[in-house]
Image (cartoon, rainbow, N blue to C red):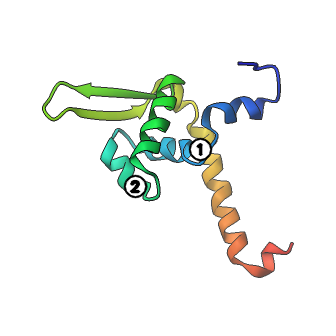
Amino acid sequence: MDMGGCPVEATLSVVGGKWKAVILWRLVGGTRRFNELQRSISQITRKMLTEQLRELEQDNLIIRTVYPEVPPKVEYSLSEYGRTFIPVLNAMAQWGLVHRERVSDPIRSTT
């Protein structure tokens, strides 16, 4: 992977797309099981959630813990490296609040 380009591209190569930042945001609050994550992100399919979790795990942003139970209990949490992304998520959340307010106010959206 070429990391010599734009640093924003480097970030988006890991957390880009529709769901990864949302998944990470849900994990900021603590460890979650698969079904908890899926319920909290209503539009995501099981297949997509599984793929996104695998990619986040491969990029060392989350930790997948499997407990030897029947049925298997699997939990997801932010890794130490993943926690370094929390300030970025907080900034995205703040921007999103301002944007949402701006879009819902027709006078402000034209300025």
**Among numbered discs 1 and 2, the one appearing first in the sequence:** 2
Is residue 106 placed above or below 60 in the rendered structure? Answer: below
At label 1, the amino acid type is Leu
Q: Quadrant of residue 99?
A: bottom right
Q: Is residue 67 left or right of residue 3?
A: left
- Tell me where residue 12 appears, x and y as whole percent: 68, 36
Q: Residues within 10 Å of mark 1 (few under 14, many from 20)?
A: some
- Tell me where residue 45 appears, x and y as whole percent: 43, 50
Image quarter of the C terminus: bottom right
Total numbered labels: 2
Residue for point 51% across, 30% down = 55
**Disc nearest the viewer among 1 and 2:** 2
State the mark number for residue 102.
none
The residue singled out by tag 2 in the image is 40
At label 2, the amino acid type is Ser
Residue for point 38% across, 40% down = 30
The residue singled out by tag 1 in the image is 89
Residue for point 57% across, 30% down = 84
- Tell me where residue 104 appears, x and y as whole percent: 68, 76
Image quarter of the N terminus: top right
**Furthest-right residue in this view:** 111
Is residue 21 placed above or below 39 in the rendered structure? Answer: above
Residue for point 82% across, 30% down = 6
- Tell me where residue 95 appears, x and y as whole percent: 68, 55
